[in-house]
Image (tube, rainbow, N blue to C red):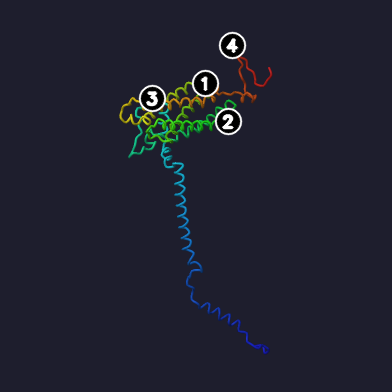
Amino acid sequence: MADPHQLFDDTSSSATALGRGYAAQQPPAVGYPAPGSFLGEPVSSFAMAYGSTLASQGKEIVDKNIDRFIPVTKLKYYFAVDTVYVGKKLGLLLFPFMHQDWQVRYQQDTPVAPRFDINAPDLYIPVMAFITYILVAGLALGTQNRFSPDLLGLQASSALAWLIVEVLAILLSLYLVTVNTDLTTIDLVAFSGYKYVGMIVGIVSGLLFGKTGYYLLLSWCCLSIFVFMIRTLRLKILSEAAAEGVLVRGAKNQLRMYLTMAIAALQPLFMYWLTFHLVSAGPAVDLLPAQRLGKTSTWQILGHGRAARSEVGVPA
């Protein structure tokens, strides 16, 4: 019953019910895109395309600038090696006397990759040999109780400095003699770096057999690298005369022959200079750590051929 004091009827509940019924009768909403979605997908796709374009342009700029200072494409050629090539090349560096064919093979005026030609220069062996030489030098210094990080760094920097000086001296000599050759700076670095293989053999033999083993095996390695450099570089420096099959006797060709022999003779000098101070008089055998433990025993040879057993650390 309505309130007699109420001026207007309360229609809120009925309006709510009508609203609910109207909402229930409305058809389902069609999937209209949200506000701003018209611009979202095109903008994002444009941003992705623009970003990829910038990335590709930046990569091209970086590649051009790197190739200007560091010939990356050329360096890939010098590291195109495999295990078979490395094994054969090491054998050629240590035993070059029986090798006959020293010509580098070409394919369409381009030298084939080192893994297909044992005569092709590479940088893998020189780089690995240089690193191994530094490690073996640290081992040799450690066996002589002379190891220190500063001394090892000095050893590495001096070896690298001598290599740079050697390559620059060869380049200057080739320029002064006016040699027409296809030798590049990277080729000279590769040929100059092959001597580290013989240096490693000399140091290891010195650690195992003392000075005698060092001088014997280093002499063999020096002779091997001398023969290797002569037979390799004569086809590069004397390329004009070698193409004709005879060596023309003249002042220019004599200078080229002298230059080839000088480069080859320079390798043994550097091999000795960079290794002689790393080898001690005797083999690197140290018994002091075992003696300090006080748990081992030694045999003291006495006069008249008699042997008496004594414990280390026990007073006589």
Q: Earlier in the sequence, mark 4 or mark 1?
A: 1
Give the Cα separation between the discs numbered 3 and 4. 50 Å
Decide which of 64, 124 is in the foreground and name it.
Answer: 64
- Circles 3 and 1: CB distance less than 8 Å? no
Give the Cα separation between the discs numbered 2 and 1. 22 Å
Give the Cα separation between the discs numbered 4 and 1. 30 Å
Q: Residue 107: horizontal and vertical position, in percent?
A: 33, 38
Looking at the image, is mark 2 or mark 3 nearer the viewer?
2
Figure quadrant of residue 116: top left
Q: Which residue corresponds to the image point at 55% horizontal and 27% vertical from the top-left?
A: 140
Most extreme residue toward the bottom is 4
Q: Earlier in the sequence, mark 3 or mark 4?
A: 3
Q: Secondary structure at mark 3?
A: loop
Residue 305 image label: 4
Query: What residue did someone put label 1 on?
Result: 211
- Circles 3 and 4: CB distance less than 8 Å? no
Query: What residue did someone put label 2 on?
Result: 151
Query: What residue did someone put label 3 on?
Result: 97
Q: Secondary structure at mark 1?
A: helix
Q: Earlier in the sequence, mark 2 or mark 3?
A: 3
